[in-house]
Image: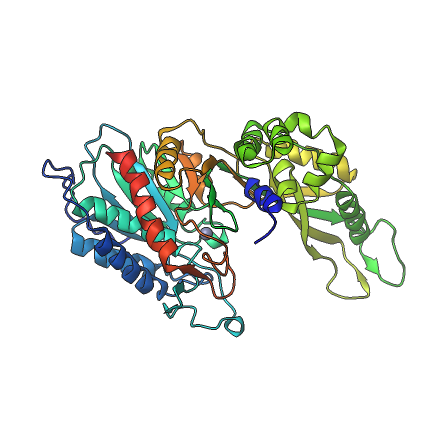
């Protein structure tokens, strides 16, 4: 567990099958749900799901889609499976509401990152349960949340809860590689299946649990930083290494990169970033709380700014960032190449514009002969926080964790939510799994990735309650 301050800062920081399209609304609704049974089944399904190897690359998410499809078929839930690229699967399912409110999408990705066998004490796709934990690649990121969403859909359907909105379950491929072959593909090609959706819940929420187990904050993530991955190309006269050229492509590139290394992008407080600081202020001691509540003023104090900047997570939320990650010059030691390249991972604070950022970088590099091209970028967008969805999370969270506040973290990384924010769907990161770092073990992408059985079971119910409140 990191120190409380650090932790708070960190937080700021086609094959088509359609079955039974009848609305799930029913007067004879509201049969009592047997939660022991639901949670037992949720555990059983989760273990089975963890056994589906969806390591990306190559992904093979079609197996995950088939896993869900089997169950949906049995349950008579309307669904479609897509295979946009060989082996890559996307599954969409819907339980219909009466249409008096707009649909909600439960979004999750089925792919997981690779693992290194050497560092794991259990089979990564064995579905092991031991000492109160469920182990497996994806146990945290994000098969647990995917299954909580799935169980929510099944439970609403089986209990014949009268729904005001359609509930759409969407499990996609390729998130770990940017989502172009999953959520990105779906948002582009099947908008009709999510038309008019109002809300979306995805990964990307952080909760704060104190070392003593007290739940301090439930996070609802309205926004994330956006990647602006750039390729820099320097050109110059080619030649023999024995006769150096001061203006060679490699030298020009290195000078440009050095200027970037020496550059600290200015602080850019957009409303969503300010809000994320303000939202955690109540958790801090008075003087600190005041600063967080008025962060724009507070950073005028150099000592406070120094503190903020000393934390990589806080730093990454208040500024655009630059990481130089890939370099390429000559492929032979005695050849001065005509071109040299660097790829840099820059990230933009929500509200920033790519064009403006590139011209800022041009000003820093001070060499117009260097070409700057975007490789991957998207709008750094945000969703509002005065919405019914946020109110639903707050209300349920108040019942479960009366002392916890609701915080609005801005993610330093990114998820698939941006594809849907671009379509006008208000999208949020929310994790119903609330526990200590030990309880939510191994971390995202970590070794021996695991989740406590109790955290998982409680989370399934928490998630259901939030969705039910939004759809009734
Ligand atoms: Zn993820």
Q: Looking at the image, which residue is at 44% across and 59% down?
A: 112
**In-front residue for pair 255/444:** 444
Q: Looking at the image, which residue is at 22% across and 48% down?
A: 155
Q: Residue furthest front?
A: 212
Q: Is residue 71 left or right of residue 86?
A: left
Q: Is residue 68 above or below residue 169?
A: below
Q: Is residue 448 above or below residue 144?
A: below
From the top left corner, tell me how far across and down residue 95 is, in percent.
22, 42
Quarter holding the C terminus? top left
**In-front residue for pair 162/291:** 291
Quarter holding the N terminus? bottom right
Asked if residue 116 shows in the view, the reply is yes
**In-front residue for pair 380/33:** 33
Q: Is residue 453 left or right of residue 231?
A: left
Q: Residue furthest left?
A: 28
Q: Is residue 428 above or below residue 209?
A: above
Asked if residue 83 shows in the view, the reply is no
**In-front residue for pair 132/277:** 132
Q: Exactly how many numbered labels are in the figure?
A: 0
Q: Looking at the image, which residue is at 52% across and 61% down?
A: 446
Q: Looking at the image, which residue is at 38% across and 54% down?
A: 455
Q: Is residue 222 left or right of residue 369?
A: left
């Amino acid at each position: 567990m990191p120190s409380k301050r650090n932790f708070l800062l960190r937080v700021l920081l086609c094959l088509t099958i359609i079955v039974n399209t009848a609305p799930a609304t029913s007067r004879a609704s509201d049969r009592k749900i047997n939660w022991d049974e639901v949670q037992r089944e949720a555990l059983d399904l989760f273990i089975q799901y963890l056994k589906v190897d969806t390591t990306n690359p190559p992904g093979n998410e079609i197996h995950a889609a088939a896993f869900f499809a089997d169950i949906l078929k049995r349950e008579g839930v309307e669904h479609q499976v897509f295979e946009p690229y060989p082996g890559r699967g996307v599954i969409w399912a819907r339980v219909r509401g009466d249409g008096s409110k707009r649909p909600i999408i439960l979004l999750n990705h089925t792919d997981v990152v690779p693992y290194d066998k050497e560092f794991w004490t259990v089979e990564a796709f064995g579905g092991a349960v031991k000492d109160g934990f469920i182990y497996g690649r994806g146990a945290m990121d994000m098969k647990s949340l995917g299954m909580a969403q799935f169980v929510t859909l099944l439970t609403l359907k089986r209990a014949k809860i009268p729904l005001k909105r359609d509930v759409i379950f969407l499990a996609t491929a390729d998130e770990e590689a940017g989502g172009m072959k999953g959520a990105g593909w779906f948002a582009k090609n099947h908008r009709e299946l999510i038309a008019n959706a109002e809300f979306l819940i995805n990964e990307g929420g952080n909760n704060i649990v104190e070392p003593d187990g007290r739940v301090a904050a439930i996070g609802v993530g309205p926004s994330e930083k956006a990647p602006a991955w750039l390729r820099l190309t320097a050109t110059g006269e080619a030649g023999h290494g024995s006769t150096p050229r001061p203006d060679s492509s490699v030298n020009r590139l290195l000078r440009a990169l050095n200027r970037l290394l020496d550059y600290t992008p200015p602080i850019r407080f957009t409303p969503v970033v300010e809000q994320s600081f303000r939202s955690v202020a109540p958790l801090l001691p008075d003087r600190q709380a005041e600063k967080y509540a008025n962060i724009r003023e507070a950073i005028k104090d150099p000592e406070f700014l120094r503190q903020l900047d000393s934390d990589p997570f806080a730093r990454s939320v208040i500024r655009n960032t630059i990481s130089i990650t890939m370099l390429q010059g000559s492929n032979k030691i005695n050849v001065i190449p005509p071109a040299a390249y660097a790829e840099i991972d820059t990230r933009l604070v929500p509200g920033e514009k790519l064009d403006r950022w590139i011209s800022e970088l041009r000003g820093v590099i001070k060499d117009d002969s260097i070409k700057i091209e975007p490789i991957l970028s998207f709008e750094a967008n945000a969703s509002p926080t005065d919405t019914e969805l946020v109110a639903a999370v707050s209300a349920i969270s108040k019942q479960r964790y009366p002392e916890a506040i609701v915080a609005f973290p801005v993610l330093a990384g990114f998820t698939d939510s941006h594809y849907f924010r671009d379509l006008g769907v208000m999208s949020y990161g929310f994790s119903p799994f609330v526990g200590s770092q030990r309880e939510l073990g191994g971390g995202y992408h970590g070794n021996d990735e695991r989740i406590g059985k109790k955290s998982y079971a409680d989370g399934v119910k928490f998630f259901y309650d939030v969705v039910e409140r939004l759809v009734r």
